[in-house]
């Protein structure tokens, strides 16, 4: 399988696809039409985007900011309050307010994630330490508890109707990319029969961050609990960078060992992706075609598809 370089994300009633500096958000509006909004992100010409592991941190931050922005933008299209025409000054103030709200939401989300997925498991491991002296076992319990919280969180939000639809669009996103990378013409029929799981998925990335952190934290030994926890926070970017490199490799390699290591992420995607309907697939196709010349990609790599 050839690596296309295109990636995406599900949003409220739509799909965001990104190809390099370009990304597009396709939405299914209430009148049944598909609205496509194409944008450009900042150039990735900083040296940090070229250094292994470090580039993972930069790309993760980019994805977090763009993801949050597109989620808020997509939600705005379905705001039931009537929108009045704004003057240039009012529009400027509105954009400034939206930017502040997005920044605030991002900060709160990061803090909550750190508390739920870092602080609480660490405090739980300190509690376990009352009964178990081995710091390695404490770290192992902490890591397992962190993974359980993550899976429990995914299961909990998957019960929400809006999230169920987001997961269906997530499936449409994966199916479109798989369809392209397997040399099939990008149409509803071919996308429908493609897999809804993909090795470069953000779900797999997050799971690998959690798994790698289990082994890394087992070697952190400080007498001070505060210092031990702060060291965990400092190492998060490093672990994210290593996880990014693996996900990047997984998207390019068909080696059996890579396929085996990719299995946990693919299994977890059974929770975060659902089978989309044809209308959702059409949205995914519209998002892809806004930023990616899939016909040119397949023409340039047509010989490799015969080996699939």
Image: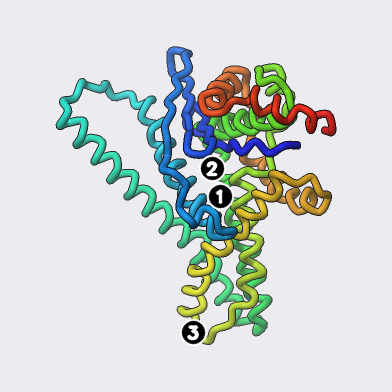
Cα separation, mark 1 vs mark 3, equals 30 Å
Question: What secondary structure is found at the residue carrying circle 1?
Answer: helix
Measuring 59% from the left and 36% from the top, which residue is drawn there? 6
Measuring 62% from the left and 43% from the top, which residue is drawn there? 201
Measuring 56% from the left and 70% from the top, which residue is drawn there? 124
Residue position for label 1:
153
First of labels 2, 3 by sequence position: 2
How is this picture coloured?
Answer: rainbow
Q: Nearer the viewer, residue 115 or 249?
A: 249
In this picture, is 145 found above or below 126? Answer: above
Cα separation, mark 1 vs mark 2, equals 6 Å
In this picture, is 66 found above or below 258? Answer: above
Residue position for label 3:
224
Q: Is residue 5 visible?
A: yes
Measuring 44% from the left and 41% from the top, which residue is drawn there? 66
Residue 55 location in percent, x, y?
54, 55
Q: Nearer the viewer, residue 75 or 307?
A: 307
Question: What secondary structure is found at the residue carrying circle 3?
Answer: loop
First of labels 1, 3 by sequence position: 1
Tag 2 near tag 3, CB within 8 Å: no
Question: What secondary structure is found at the residue carrying circle 2?
Answer: helix
Residue 281 location in percent, x, y?
60, 22
Residue 221: quadrant of the picture: bottom right
Q: Is residue 161 visible?
A: no
Q: Which mark is residue 61?
A: none
Q: Please tell me whether mark 2 or mark 3 is closer to you in this view.
A: 3
Tag 1 near tag 2, CB within 8 Å: yes
The local crowd at label 3, few if under 14, some if 14 to 19, many if 20 or more residues have their Cα within 10 Å, is: few
Residue 12 location in percent, x, y?
47, 31
Residue position for label 2:
157
């Amino acid at each position: 399988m050839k690596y296309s370089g295109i990636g995406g994300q599900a949003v409220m009633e739509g799909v965001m696809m990104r190809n390099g500096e370009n990304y597009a958000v396709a939405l299914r509006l209430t009148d049944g039409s598909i609205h496509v909004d194409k944008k450009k992100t900042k150039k990735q010409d900083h040296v940090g985007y070229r250094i292994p592991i470090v580039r993972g941190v930069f790309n993760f931050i980019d994805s977090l900011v763009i993801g949050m922005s597109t989620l808020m933008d997509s939600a705005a299209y379905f705001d039931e309050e009537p929108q009045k025409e704004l003057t240039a000054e009012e529009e400027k103030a509105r954009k400034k307010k939206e930017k502040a709200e997005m920044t605030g939401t991002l900060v709160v989300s990061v803090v909550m994630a750190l508390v739920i997925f870092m602080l609480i498991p660490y405090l739980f491991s300190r509690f376990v330490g009352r009964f178990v002296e081995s710091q390695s076992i404490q770290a192992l319990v902490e890591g397992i508890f962190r993974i359980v919280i993550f899976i429990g969180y995914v299961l909990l939000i998957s019960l929400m109707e809006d999230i169920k639809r987001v997961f269906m669009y997530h499936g449409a996103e994966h199916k479109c990319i798989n369809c392209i990378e397997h040399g099939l013409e990008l149409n509803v029929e071919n996308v429908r029969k493609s897999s809804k799981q993909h090795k470069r998925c953000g779900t797999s990335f997050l799971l690998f961050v959690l798994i790698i952190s289990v082994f890394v934290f087992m070697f952190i030994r400080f007498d001070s609990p505060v210092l031990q926890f702060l060291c965990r926070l400092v190492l998060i970017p490093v672990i994210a960078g290593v996880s990014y490199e693996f996900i990047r490799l997984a998207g390019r390699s068909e080696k059996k060992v890579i396929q085996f290591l990719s299995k946990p992420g693919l299994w977890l995607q059974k929770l975060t992706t659902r089978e989309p309907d044809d209308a959702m697939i059409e949205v995914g196709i519209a998002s892809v075609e806004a930023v990616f010349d899939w016909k040119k990609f397949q023409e340039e790599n047509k010989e490799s598809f015969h080996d699939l």
